């Protein structure tokens, strides 16, 4: 089964760790939303965790840099650090596209 | 069996290396603007300088004064609006005692307020402006961290009456000048008089509205609500 096949069948549960309205946090959320709408429409949920409000939550997913996206489902857990501005890298990181 | 264990461990290490490389790439490409630092669950978020820009612009442009002060009342930060309220340049405010910019009768209350500051508390005081006038303001705590209180200072004067009243008076003055200029002819003079009449009525309505607003605002109370 290719990554695309897998993506077409599963519910995606994504968690984005942000730092308030920092520019990179806002960019990451916008980029993530766009990628999800294009590749996972109707099959994804995004949980935004603002670490400025709750820094202790960083421990749950061992977050060091912000923004960081964590793919909770489908397993295995994957982490993507950064503003997700490189769509190709984001798709590969989420395993929506095979690594070249 | 041992071979399989080694392979699993190797795969795990590969994934961790890949994550570390990915994080290094994101940081070196400027794709992050905050870090979590601190041991275990006591992490704190440190924002890089550019991440503050949005908040800074908001604070600098808002119509409320913003001041950060130490518990003993030394000013560490002021936005332009607060400096304008006092009529002094911002650099003059740095490390100055905030008390020195309020009326003598309000100083003890302000001092106590800063020492005991807590979220959602507020007081009303008179600011002493450089030109000798005073300005009624409400001071509230916006945040309190590391021993420093960030205060929001709101001008308590009725918002509209000065500019509206001045506009109305200017309009009357303009109408009177028009009347003087056109008095020779009966038609224009009548028009000018009608303008004056309308302006007077408008002014009267505004005064009524102002009185309603003042009645709703009620008498200004001092001290903690």
Image (cartoon, coloured by chain):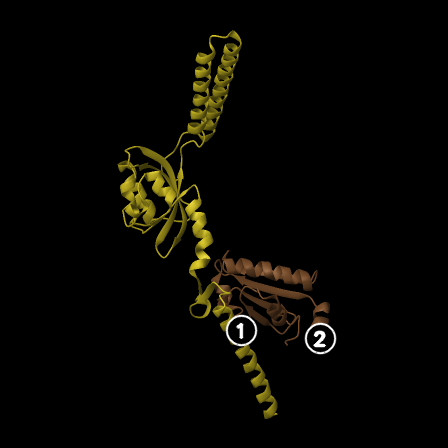
Secondary structure of the residue carrying tag 2 is: loop
Q: Which chain is yellow?
A: B
Circle 1 SS class: helix
Return the chain for callout 2: A
The quarter in which the N terminus of chain A is drawn is: bottom right
Q: Which residue in the structure is indicated by mark 2?
A: A2
Q: Is residue A74 left or right of residue B73?
A: right
Q: Is residue B2 left or right of residue B46?
A: right
Residue closer to the observer: B207 or B120: B207
- Chain letter corresponding to the colour brown: A
Q: In the displayed structure, would residue B63 be above or below residue B32?
A: above
Residue A46 at x, y percent in the picture? 61, 61
Quarter of the figure that contains the C terminus of chain A: bottom right
Crowdedness of circle 2 by 10 Å Cα count: few (<14), some, many (20+)? few
Q: Label 1: which residue?
A: B22
Q: Quadrant of residue B140?
A: top left
């Amino acid at each position: 089964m290719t990554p695309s096949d897998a993506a077409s069948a599963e519910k995606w549960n994504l968690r984005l760790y942000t730092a308030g309205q920092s520019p990179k946090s806002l960019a990451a959320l916008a980029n993530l939303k766009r990628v999800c709408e294009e590749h996972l429409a109707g099959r994804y949920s995004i949980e935004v965790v603002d670490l400025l409000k709750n820094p202790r939550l960083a421990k749950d997913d061992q977050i060091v840099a912000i923004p960081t996206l964590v793919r909770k489902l489908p397993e295995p857990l994957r982490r993507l650090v950064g503003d997700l501005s490189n769509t190709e890298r984001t798709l590969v990181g989420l395993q929506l596209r095979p690594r070249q | 069996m041992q071979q399989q264990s080694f392979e699993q461990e190797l795969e795990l290490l590969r994934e961790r290396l890949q994550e570390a490389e990915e994080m290094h790439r994101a940081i070196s490409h400027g794709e992050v603007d905050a870090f979590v630092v601190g041991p275990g669950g006591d992490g704190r978020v440190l924002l890089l300088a550019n991440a503050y820009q949005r908040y800074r612009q908001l604070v600098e442009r808002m119509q409320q004064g913003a001041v950060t002060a130490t518990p003993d009342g030394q000013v560490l930060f002021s936005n332009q609006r607060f400096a304008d309220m006092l009529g002094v340049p911002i650099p003059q405010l740095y490390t100055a005692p905030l008390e020195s910019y309020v009326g003598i009768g309000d100083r003890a209350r302000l001092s106590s307020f800063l020492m005991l500051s807590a979220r959602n508390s507020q007081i009303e005081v008179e600011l002493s402006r450089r030109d000798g006038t005073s300005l009624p303001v409400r001071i509230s705590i916006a945040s309190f961290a590391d021993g420093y209180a960030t205060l929001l200072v709101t001008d308590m004067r009725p918002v509209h009456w000065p500019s509206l009243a001045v506009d109305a008076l200017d309009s009357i003055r303009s109408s009177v000048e028009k009347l003087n200029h056109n008095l020779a002819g009966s038609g224009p003079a009548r028009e000018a008089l009608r303008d004056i009449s309308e302006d007077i009525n408008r002014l009267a309505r505004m005064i009524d509205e102002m009185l309603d607003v003042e009645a709703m605002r009620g008498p200004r109370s001092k001290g903690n609500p």
